[in-house]
Image (cartoon, rainbow, N blue to C red):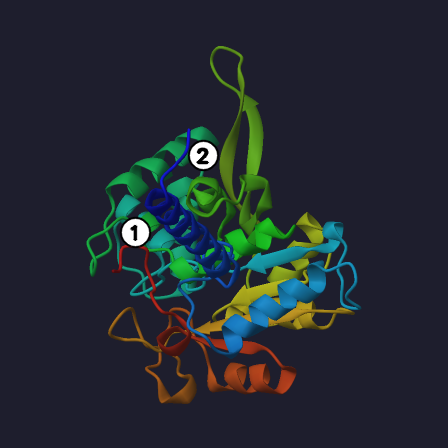
């Protein structure tokens, strides 16, 4: 069949337009459209902290890099209170204990005795059930949300980013090991065997039907704070961390221990300096003094001297919680 000339000219015009559109779409995609990889840290503002994380991971996971770290040695440790979730106005676990056994507590020693009294002789499974129940019902006094919703979105992204590049992430906390192990996997993606905390003794026994179970005892096995953190890391992991993250004087020795290793190392501290979106406390840089999660001027100065990165919550985090717009 012969196609009239005017129709042939129209078909050439139409086909030419389709080809041009296709080529333009391809160029747009190649130039940075759909092919661009997703931002692994969308809740972080551009700056030294974010750049330092990306550079560290890139260098330690590239086999061609002189700073390459074998997968088995990719260990990252995180304090929990004030580093992964809110610790003000009082540590969540302290509130859990006080609500179980109300009473006047004015010193750390009194709190430890209270905790020992409250937990002594309790079957471990009963304790875990109590923690789960408390977490399901307790609400933070400021936001009126469960504590498990008050984790820091930038740190959640960091945990996932590290794991996506072969890092094994651990919680190393001064809080109770049994307490944190109840929810760590569901909240942070960190299984209970990768939680190191202050640990009390347990006693093996049998119930009335002869079934074995563990009972909590008031004897402290590991005080996982200050120097206890690197001691606990050696006891439970057996490897020096490649990266460590904290927020207070209780994390100082963990960061020192991490940074002292050979090769690439990353030590970072979260500074709470955003009273509007969360809290502002130090007393470093003239911020409010506090007995909960103290970040002293001495710690700040050591961070600068040792090459640790101080993360400004106000300047480095685009958003703090997942529920923020």
Question: Which quadrant would residue 262 be assigned to in this image?
Answer: bottom right
- Judging from the image, what secondary structure is the residue with disc 2 in? loop
Circle 1 sits on which residue?
Answer: 98
- Residue 325 in view: yes
Figure check: 302 above or below 324: below
Q: Are marks 2 and 1 in contact (CB under 8 Å)?
A: no
- Residue at point 27%, 55% (across, down): 323
Figure check: 298 above or below 234: below
Query: Residue 121: which disc?
Result: 2
- Residue at point 38%, 69% (across, down): 292
Closest to the camera, between mark 2 and mark 1, is 1
Spatial CA distance of label 2 from label 1 is 18 Å
Q: Is residue 315 left or right of residue 58?
A: left
- Judging from the image, what secondary structure is the residue with disc 1 in? helix
Query: Residue 253: which disc?
Result: none
Q: Classify the position of the N terminus by image quarter.
A: top left
């Amino acid at each position: 069949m012969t196609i009239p000339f005017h129709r042939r000219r129209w078909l050439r015009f139409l086909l030419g337009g389709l080809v041009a559109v296709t080529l333009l779409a391809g160029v747009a995609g190649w130039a940075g459209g759909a092919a661009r990889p997703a931002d692994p840290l969308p809740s972080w503002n551009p700056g030294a902290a974010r750049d330092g994380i990306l550079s560290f991971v890139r260098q330690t996971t590239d086999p061609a890099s002189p700073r390459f770290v074998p997968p088995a040695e990719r260990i990252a440790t995180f304090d929990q209170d004030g580093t992964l979730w809110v610790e003000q106005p009082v540590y969540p676990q302290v509130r859990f204990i006080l609500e179980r056994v109300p009473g006047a507590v004015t010193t750390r020693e009194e709190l430890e005795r209270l905790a020992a009294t409250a937990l002594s002789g309790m079957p471990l499974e009963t304790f875990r059930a109590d923690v789960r129940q408390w977490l399901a019902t307790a609400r933070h006094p400021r936001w009126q949300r469960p504590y498990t919703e008050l984790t820091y979105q930038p740190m959640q992204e960091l945990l996932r980013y590290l794991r996506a590049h072969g890092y094994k992430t651990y919680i190393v906390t001064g809080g109770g090991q049994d307490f944190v192990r109840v929810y760590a996997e569901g909240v942070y993606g960190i299984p209970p065997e990768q939680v190191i905390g202050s640990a009390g003794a347990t006693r093996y026994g049998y119930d009335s039907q002869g079934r074995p179970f563990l009972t909590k005892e008031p004897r402290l096995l590991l005080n996982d704070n200050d120097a206890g953190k690197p001691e606990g890391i050696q006891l439970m992991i057996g490897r020096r961390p490649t990266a460590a993250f904290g927020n207070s004087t209780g994390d100082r020795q963990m960061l020192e221990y991490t940074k002292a290793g050979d090769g690439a190392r990353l030590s970072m501290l979260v500074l709470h300096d955003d009273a509007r979106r969360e809290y502002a406390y130090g007393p470093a840089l003239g911020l409010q003094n506090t007995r909960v999660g103290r970040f002293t001027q001495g710690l700040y100065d050591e961070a600068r001297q040792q090459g640790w990165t101080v993360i400004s919550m106000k300047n480095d985090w685009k958003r703090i919680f997942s529920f923020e717009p």
